Every structure is written in C-alpha cells, then in structure tokens.
Amino acid sequence: MGIDITRFCGDVDGDLLCSICSFVLEDPIQAPDCEHVFCNTCITEWLTSNQTCPLDRTNLTVGALKPAPRILRNFLSRLTLSCYYQIQGCPALLTLESLATHLLDCDFNPKRLVTCQSGCGISITFEELQKHNCLQCLKFDMELLTIVQKENEEKISEMQSELNLQAIVQKQNEEKMLKMQFELDLLKAEIDKLKKGNPAKQSTSSDSQLLPTAGQSQAVNQGTVLTDQSWLTNISIYMNTRDLLFQYCCPTPKKWMLKIARKNISESLCPLEIVNTLIQNSHESRWPPGIRSEEAREANRDQLTAYRYRYLYKTFKNNQLGNGIEVLTSIGIIMAVDNTHMDEDMVINPGFLVLMTLNLHPMEG
C-alpha cells in the first residue's frame, strides 16, 4: 500500500504514483518487460490471483519482479511530506528519505519506548504510559521478586543438601580410613609381640622403672597377682600419636563393656583395688578435668596425642548387633605413672580407662 498523497507538500508527478492503489509509490518495484512500476505490496498481492501485468496484461510473476530504477527512487526520496503522527500533534515536515529515521524518535509515536518518571522507572511505550499505574507495576515487580527469591531459596536449599550429603560421605570415608589405620596398628602390635616373644617388653627407656624384678617375673609366670605398679609390665605401652583413643572412645560405656574391661585387666594380674578404681574412672565424669567433656577435649586436642597408654583388646560376636558381626572392644589404660609429662589437669591417680568398640566386619548396605 502506497503513501497517502495528501500528506505531501505540493503536487506529486503522476509517474510517482502506483497504478494499483493510486498513492505515492512505497518500496517501488518494476515489471521486467513493460517496465511498469508499482508498490511492492500492491503488485505482490495482485499476482497472488493474477499472472499478468495489471496495465498491459503481459505475463508477469513475482519471481520476475525487480527493483525500480535508481533515478525513480531518488525522485521519491526528495519528496517532502508530513509525519505519520501529524494527527497526534507532530509538526515535522521531512523528506521521504528521512521519514523512517524520524519515526523511531518521534515524540508523538505511541510505540516509542519511554521511561516512567513517576517513580517506578519502567521502560514502556508512550501509548501504554497514558494508562500506566506505578503502584500496580511495583506490586507486580514485588510478586516477581518474591517468585525469584523463592526459586533461589529452593536452589540454595538443594545445594546445601548436596553439600551436607557430601560432608556425610566425606566423614564416613574418613571414619573408614581411621578404622583401617586402627586395625593396621593392632595388627602391627601383634606382629611385634610375636617377633619379640615377650609382649610385656617396653620400647622406651623411660619405662625401665616398670620392669619386674626376677621375683616378680616368677610370680607372673605362676599366675600370682602383683602389687603396686608392677602388673603394668604385662601390658604393652603405646603413644596416642594419631589420637585413636578419643576418636572412637565411648565416654559413657555400657555395662557389658565394663564387664569385658574388668575381666581383661584382672587377667593382667592387676590388684583388685586398682581394677575397681579404673572401672570407676571409665566414665568421662571421672576423667581428668582437662578431658572431662567434649568441649574440654576439643580445647586440649593438641595434648591428646601426648598421652601414653596401655592397651588391651577383646574380640567377640555381639548378637545384639546382628548375626556374624565381630566386635572389637579396646581398652586404653592411661596411668599417671606413664604420663608424668602431662599437665596436672590431664591425669588422675592411679589412672583411668578409655573404652572403644569397633565393628571389624560391618554388614553390607
């Protein structure tokens, strides 16, 4: 469809009019043989139902059309006309060549994007601005922000759940590694006993004062209960270098654990009075002040690895834990005489017990 001739200033040459719509040519296009010129839209629509030129009836198809001559397009571009939005109040007079650029920035173009100056700052068309309500706009923005915030919170929750799951898996893996290291240390200790042929032999000179006399050794062989601290020579001593004691300790041991501990310590020829005291000191409430609570142990964690302890253990099948579950009960005996290098709030006389349990062959799944 061409441009309304009434919008142009002065007379318009008839050669610049479309023969179909009778308006000034818009996007002119030419028939190749007869060289008649029409608006692109007009001739294309004509050829949808006709295959001839509308003026001389010569054969014509859409594919045969070509752009109008340059001289014709130059004449058209120099024509002066009013803006499309003259009715809306635009007073501009401009050439056809500059019309398209002017329309983009015309202040009277209802489709032109403008920014609301009433507070919300939204970019909308000039036409929509006339009926724009900032309160409704802000309310919509708040609802949209609420939805986005909820989605973000859900994503954060999912990510936090994944992180928590990863932390649990990591902790389980660390515990498995510690258990494996713990079992390896036990195996090494048993191998050392077999190699030395004397499980009571000490590895450091500081324990020489605990070695039994000839008479005491004979008493041990005969199964006699020894007095004082000499019974300790029957139990190997270790350093808590990796803090295995408190990694798996039971600060409030069960009765069956105390029963096993009492039996094993008694079999080491420990005097009954000391056995009873050690059993009483197996609960964390009877431990030294420096490790009497989880908070205290955490505060003194750097000192835990300095403990020297005597070690006993017993393996048995615990039916309460499931069929075929072999449980290792470990007994750490921390005696004051072995830990004279520790601070006063880290030891008690004559000593205390740290009990542990470990499933050696956990069930699958």
Image (tube, rainbow, N blue to C red):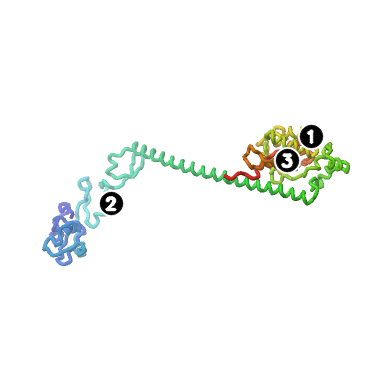
Pointer 3 or 1: first along the chain: 1
**Residue 14 left/right relative to 171:** left
Residue 195 in sight from this viewpoint: yes
* Quarter of the image where the N terminus is located: bottom left
Disc 3: which residue: 332
The 10 Å Cα crowd at callout 1, few under 14, some 14 to 19, many 20 or more, is some
Mark 2 or 3, nearer chain start:
2
Dot 2 falls on a residue whose secondary structure is helix
Q: Amino acid at mark 1?
A: Ile
Label 2 vs label 3: CA separation?
87 Å
Most foreground residue, 294 or 359: 359
Q: Is residue 343 left or right of residue 19?
A: right
Q: Which residue matches tag 1?
A: 274
Q: Residue at x 64, y 48 (%)?
A: 177
Q: Secondary structure at mark 3?
A: strand
Q: Amino acid at mark 3?
A: Gly
Mark 2 or 3: the one toward you: 3
Q: Amino acid at mark 2?
A: Leu
User: 10 Å neighbourhood of mark 3: few (<14), some, or many (≥20)?
Assistant: many
Residue 188: assigned label: none
In the image, residue 306 above or below residue 280: below
> Which residue is at the far bottom?
33
Tag 1, which secondary structure? helix
